[in-house]
Amino acid sequence: MSEENAGSEELVVSWSGIYTTLVVSVAQGLIFYLFFVWQRGRDRKKEKNSYDLYEPRQYSREHRSPAPFQKNWWKEAWDISDEETLRCVGLDSFMFLRFLRLGARISLVGSLFAIILIPVYATSENTGKATEQFNSLSLAKVEADGDRLWSPLTLWVVFTAFILREFWKEWVAYAIHRYEFLARGDEEMPKEYRYAIRVERIPYKYRSNAALREYFERLFPGKVKQVTVYFKFEALQKLVDQRQATIEAAERAIAFTMAKPDEPRPTLKLGGSRLCCNLDIADAIGHYEWKIKTLNQEIDSIRRTLVGPVDMDDDGFPDEDIAEADDANAAKRTKKNEKETNKDSDDGEASEVKSATSRDEEGDEPSLDDPLMLARTCSTAFVTFTSLRAKQAAVQCELTGNTTSMLVYPAADHSGILWNNVTVSQPVQKVLKFQAALLWTAGLILWAVVVSSVVAISNLNSILELIGLNTLDEDTIWYGLLAGFIPVFALDVLVYIVYLGIVTVAKYFIRYKSLPEVDSYAINWHMLFQFANLFYVMIGGSLLNQVNSLNEAGGDITETVRVLADAMSGSAIFFINMILYETFGSFGLELSMLPTYGVNLIMGIAVRPEALRTQRMIDEAHKAPSVGWGEQMPPVVFVFLVTIVYMPIVPVIEFFAFLFFVVSYLLWKHQFLHVYAQQFEGGGDATWICLFKFLMASLYIGQVVFIICMALKEAGIQVYLAAIPLVATMIVHTLLYIKIIRPLRYLSLEVAADVDILDGELTT
């Protein structure tokens, strides 16, 4: 088949989808933005400025927030310095903002290169319908083995060098802030947690406060401030949760009575099923008070069995920190072994997965009738030191010489600890994590079907032509909506559902012990699904765009390669539509806080007037929301990935990416300063350390795709020269790891000693 005949059957990649998506996204964003301006004006005109929707940080973080904005929200956000931004928002949010600025700089350089490449591509001599309209501005227009292939190669080398330079500069800047965080933490974090570690896989003989304290005192004499070994006693936890629910129900009943003193007091039907007649009617407040007292007695009874007599607080409630009570019997039993060497094998580890009452390494078999031993099967504890040197030594040194016993990790911010998951053993978590990994791996494979279905909608004419039906007019707004906006919106919703599933698995199936661990897990798997989107759309979109040309190519390898090379550029239409939707539609939705407004409106209708709300409900309503990094970061990294990969292939995409990063930076800087307050601070673990591996992966993928494109274009020496940036990337990545990344894992003992001297150690 001749090249001319093949080209006559190829499908033209039209601009109509981009036009329609742009119009719909801008209209959506404009509606949301106008709501933001209107509602913000109403809040400002109230007698007392309302901070509920757009300034919730004024309630909880006023000391770390700028004054409420008055006129131009974007200009006020822009004018705030980096130093003040870091002080206000913390290192996690600050590094996310720096990443957005990094993306803006890289896409700006890409846009400058696009100004050079677009005329080069547009005036090339390759022919065929696959090089018309949108593809006339892409690498598809360049003839195979032509001299013009030197242009994208040269600019790609410079582009790669610029990206590597920017990566290095960002790590140098981050290192300064990271070391300060490791040394002194965030100002909202209690000082004790900066000196604390989490210990996992504790052998049975050390599973008491006294025994574990003695162990660490032997390693760090006089430096142990507090030891907390956690119980695993589900019956007690169930009663505590039931008491908390009863307390909140009593608060609601009291609030109703105080708000409406003339109304009858709330009542409850007791004595059986709600469907039964002749049920006893009881005063709700009196019943709740009786139930709380009964639950207190039951809780006290169980705790007394575990740890002896329980002290009551001033309000008549027992102290709930049951983990801090020492067990004298356990301490005596450990005393017998004080001369033994630390031979902490992990023989009981596998059986911990099967049973909570496995044999410990002393040979003792915990009795099923002994509630104390059942409660002490938890292998997790927190240890607080008096000096930062001791903490860093414990984290960085090998304590036992056994990699399956007494594993030590820096303690997370207390606000980010999932206390209900603390007692889950690490071996159990590993098994569950492996099972979940199998689930998500299968999901990534099956995800191809989902993405292919969405891509099929955006390539509707290709499908219609394949099955012998008349194609639709691509210049109509309806076709543009169907092929442009709807597939992007559908994929965005489906990916969000996947994200919710990932978080649910992390919290309730694997049961990670802290929100930083949940965020890291969500980021990794959500990011993998986003990366899969690139390949599934790129490959699937290319095949669907030119399915008829591929059929006519038959078994001709050369012709098939030519068609794929020209068609790869056409899949960029989908990515441009996605960037437009995120730039305008998602921007307006986020700035307007419309979902939060809707929830508040429903709550206001359901619970009105405000006097009916308990103080707990009022405090919760004033609490500033927190950003889930696992939700927000992967879509932004996906745009970064597309920016890198498509710069030499479809350079026009750089203009859209630059607009996205600039708008996103202004939006999120404003939101971090005025709306969001992170529940915990990770010091950039999620927003730079975890993020960076995906930025490097984006660059590596871009290198490989560019080499493949050069090969598909039958380039000669350009294919081999295209490998030079790949080698340079590997070298710089290695140097970064050796010189900056690896030393930043922990705080050096020298710096820890300086902090102890300057700030003083904790008192015991």
Image: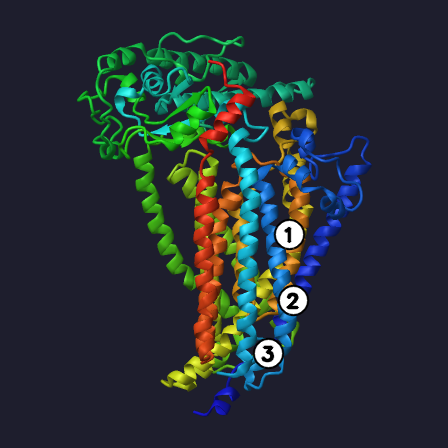
**Mark 1 sits on what residue?**
664
Q: In this view, does 439 lie above or below 214?
A: below
Query: Label 1, label 2: how many angstroms apart (C-alpha)?
Result: 20 Å
Residue contact between numbered discs 2 and 3, judged by CB atoms under 8 Å: no
x and y percent of residue 692 in the render? 49, 50
Amino acid found under the numbered disc labelled 3: Tyr
Q: Residue at x 79, y 42 (%)?
A: 41
> Which residue is nearer to you in this view: 256 or 754?
754
Which callout, 2 or 3, points to the residue nearer the camera?
A: 2
Amino acid found under the numbered disc labelled 1: Ser
User: Which of the two labelled residues, at mark 2 and mark 3, occupies the earlier sequence position?
Assistant: 2
x and y percent of residue 100 in the render? 61, 51
The residue lying furthest to the left in this view is 363
Q: Which residue is drawn at 47% across and 59% down?
A: 729
x and y percent of residue 693 in the render? 46, 51
The circle drawn on residue 197 is none
Q: In this view, does 538 lie above or below 199?
A: below
Whether residue 422 is visible: no
User: Which of the two labelled residues, at mark 3 and mark 1, occupies the earlier sequence position?
Assistant: 3
Query: Label 3, label 1: how many angstroms apart (C-alpha)?
Result: 30 Å
> Which residue is nearer to you in this view: 288 or 357?
357
Amino acid found under the numbered disc labelled 2: Leu
Secondary element type, mark 3: helix
Secondary element type, mark 2: helix
The circle drawn on residue 121 is 3
Query: Label 2, label 3: how many angstroms apart (C-alpha)?
Result: 15 Å
**Mark 2 sits on what residue?**
112
